[in-house]
Amino acid sequence: MFSNSPVIILVQPQLAENIGMTARAMMNCGLYDLRLVSPRENHLSPKAVSASSGADKILEKAEVYTSTEAAIADLQKIYATTARRRDMIKQVATADFAAEQITSAAANGTRCGILFGPERTGLHNDDVCLADSIIEIPLNPEHCSLNLSQAVLLVGYEWFKRQIQSPASQMVTNKTTLADKQKVLQFLKHFEDKLDNCGNFRICEKRERMVINLRNIFTRNELTEQELNTLYGIINYLDNK
Amino acid sequence: MFSNSPVIILVQPQLAENIGMTARAMMNCGLYDLRLVSPRENHLSPKAVSASSGADKILEKAEVYTSTEAAIADLQKIYATTARRRDMIKQVATADFAAEQITSAAANGTRCGILFGPERTGLHNDDVCLADSIIEIPLNPEHCSLNLSQAVLLVGYEWFKRQIQSPASQMVTNKTTLADKQKVLQFLKHFEDKLDNCGNFRICEKRERMVINLRNIFTRNELTEQELNTLYGIINYLDNK
């Protein structure tokens, strides 16, 4: 899907289910390259495959190594994820910043990998010191323990966001289109005329304020042509009654 | 922990385990206000409590409603999370943008809520149309199905990031301090002198390039005073041999 995406490396994962859930989280984020260092359980067991809910391709392609050194040998930049601070002198980045760095590095052809430790203990210091940088996911310090696959999901999600261009916020109108301003103003004029005719705007000094309120209500919500027609229909129906 | 944090509303969740895992994800993200609309299983069952791994306070405080309308009644701005596009004319925001909006709205005193649908189907259109806006988490379109608690985690994570000031990237030196440039340059001078003395820089025309390389190596990695001492020790040991 994306070229030169980072490799996810699980160091001594304990449970097959967590390997499967990690594969699922990776697929959610467009990541396909999984490596396992001495997993305790078989990553192709029915438990793992079932937990991957459809991401079994990733499990089948996963490579197993007997040491972290071997698993990172062909890579050029390594990140270690940790939940607690270590007595180690090292760059510590948020998942956000690391995703930005990995994306830039990958664009320069650098092959990156991200280490995740065993469920119970997290990465050993022996593994952390192999990494160029540490990733610390910003979470509630009073409760920052994450399931292994959730840690992969958050880091993967930050990476995925940078591979795609999704508009931060958009008005989704499906098959209809937003009305142009002429149509919106015509509708407002029509509505105001009807209200004038039926005597709603009797109190002259209040008319101006009410018109402004109405215009604010209907210009705030990006009406489509279809919706304008719905509103015309209602007003005309009420008028005929 | 944070005032006016958004309310997480699970509409007809099916599994007690998922309610528990949602509570855990909420606590990870500093969210404490959980509401449940007609849950199929008891949110205080041992299954739910065990899955919450320590976030049972959130389960105990959770409020149960019989309709989405009742669950959102006292709130002012509602977001609906959906994985697939609906035939509905509505603002669609990324989790990122929505988190920004919720944070701004909350600062103005607006009480926000976020709806999450049942595991199997997601939110019904009847619930989506109650929301001011839709949140669509940007994920691999070929595999975007998330576990309920993972959806809560990603939205909560984006929100939490905005409540704290965590430095994007920092050099963590624990009890030691980064060496000032004078100390680094002194060390480099010492190293170069030793190399001169032992004849490493015999070929004159190569000396300049080698010195530049060495300086780049040792200025690139933000050495601490302690680390400089380690390097001095090694050089002096080798020199004495």
Image (cartoon, coloured by chain):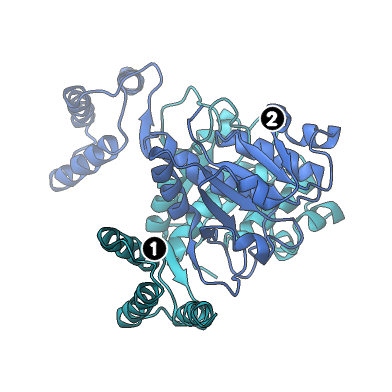
Chain colours: A blue, B cyan
Residue B140: image tag: none
Do the CB atoms of the residues marked 2 and 1 lie less than 8 Å apart? no
Q: In this view, does B226 lie to the left or right of A223?
A: right
SS at badge 2: helix
Q: Where is residue B76 in the image (x, y as percent from the top left)?
A: 45, 51
Q: Is residue A214 left or right of residue A63?
A: left
Residue A61: image tag: 2
Residue toward you, A160 or B36: A160
Residue A164 figure quarter: top left
Q: Is residue A73 left or right of residue A175?
A: right
- Disc 1 designates what residue? B217
Which chain does tag 2 point to? Answer: A
Position of residue B143 relative to residue A146, above or below, is above
Residue B14 in view in this figure: yes
Q: How far apart are marks 2 and 1 (CA)?
A: 37 Å
Q: Position of residue B155 (x, y in %)?
A: 53, 48
Q: Please give the count of numbered marks on the rendered protein.
A: 2
Q: Given the image, on which type of amino acid does mark 2 rest?
A: Lys
- Residue in the image at 37% along x and 80% along y: B190
Q: Do labels 2 and 1 share a chain?
A: no
Q: Position of residue B231 (x, y in %)?
A: 48, 77
SS at badge 1: helix
Residue toward you, B167 or B222: B222
